[in-house]
Image (cartoon, rainbow, N blue to C red):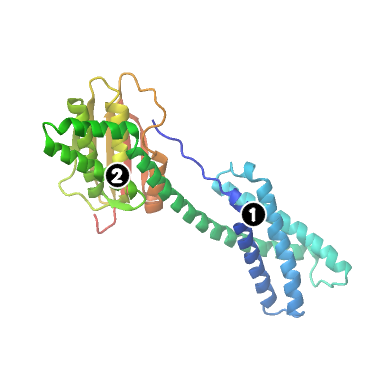
Amino acid sequence: MDEQPQKLPVLPAFCQAGTVLWAILLAQAVAVLLALAPGVTEDRWLRLGFSSLFVQWVSLLTIALLCLLRRRLDALPANRLGLVVLLLLFIVTSLVSLAAWSTLTRVGWEPRVPPGLFILHNLAIAAVVGVIGMMIFSMHLERSQRVAAQSRAELDALQARIRPHFLFNSLNTVAGLIPGHPREAETALLDLSSLFRAALHAGEQSTLREEIELTRQYLALEQWRLAERLTVDWQLPDQLPEVAMPALTLQPLVENAVRHGIEPSRDGGCLRVSVQASARSLTLLVENPMPEEPARRTGNGVALDNIRQRLTLLHGDQARLTAGLVDGRYRAKLVLPRNREEA
């Protein structure tokens, strides 16, 4: 019922024209700094020319290697990938340094340091520039992932809400209520409208109180359809804490429980939603019974990995979402941090 996290590709970005342009600009900025450094005795324009030629060769060759090896390197974890990128940068810097030393000494350049120290100096500069470059790229990548996660959240949530199975069932429920229960039909339509509205704002921030209210509206719709097959056990504290969370976090977990725990079961079951608050964290539990014969359907009705990504963007590693079997029941456990003023 759970989904496997999807690893976003990183290295293909180095093969794009925009990334190459930024690398050229960063390399040229390093060349300018080397030319303007105090203590330089030779002509600064000449030094700028040689420095520019050197750093551009290093940067372009490194990018070319990353593009050629992107399929193999993208399979590495992030920390190991960073080390491999630095290692490639050092190899290219050493080779270009040797070529520059050999070429310049043949045309009459008189070095003041031995070749080993010359290469070591260049490697030190490459290490500093490489770390700074990876930090800048990681910030850009994080921003891109944030935008992509929000876009996927809005799209996934909207598709889930307008799924024909759910939409037709809801409309049939409303149609059945109109003759004898017009007020209940109106309430059901308003609940359905709230779900559509929340789906359009799935990339935004919400609160625990708003998430619970939206979940109640969803369960009210399902209650009309499933009747006595669905019972809901709410275990909430008297005072709900104001904890921030991504919009459409709790409702998809409850929908997953209804679709895969209650709906396939002949006799239905009890769905339990509980909130446990402590001084430092808030724990949300969504539990449902397992049907006698699990339904044969792909997917789990909720993008758990997408919820995890949005939780990470909002709370970092202080928030976590786990799901699995516990004592014969399927449980989704969501842990959120609490600010001191909230506690």
Query: Residue 196, which numbered label?
Result: 2
Assign the C terminus to one quadrant of the image.
Answer: bottom left
Q: Which residue is drawn at 32% across and 48% down?
A: 247
- Please, is residue 183 above or below residue 245 in the view? above
Query: In the current view of this chain or complex, which residue is farthest to the front?
Result: 179
Which of these two is toward me, 194 or 85?
194
| Amino acid type indicated by mark 2 | Phe
Percent position of residue 231, x then y: 19, 30
> Which residue is tagged 1?
86
The percent coordinates of residue 140 (x first, y second) are 51, 58
Q: Which mark is residue 132?
A: none
Q: What residue type is labelled 1?
A: Leu
Q: Where is 6 relative to 246, above or below?
A: above
Secondary structure type for disc 1: helix
Question: Which residue shows up at 16% across the image and 32% down it?
Answer: 177
Q: In this view, does 270 lie to the left or right of 58?
A: left
Image spot of residue 276 (x, y percent): 24, 43
Q: Residues within 10 Å of mark 1 (few under 14, many from 20)?
A: some
In which quadrant is the N terminus drawn?
A: top left
Is 281 drawn above or below residue 293 in the view shown? below
Dot 2 crowding, Cα within 10 Å, few <14, some 14–19, many 20+: some
Earlier residue among tags 1 and 2: 1
Residue 255 image-quadrant placement: top left
How many numbered marks does the figure carry?
Answer: 2
Tag 2 secondary structure:
helix
Q: Is residue 3 left or right of residue 341?
A: right
Query: Is there any visible trace of residue 124 in the rendered image?
Result: yes
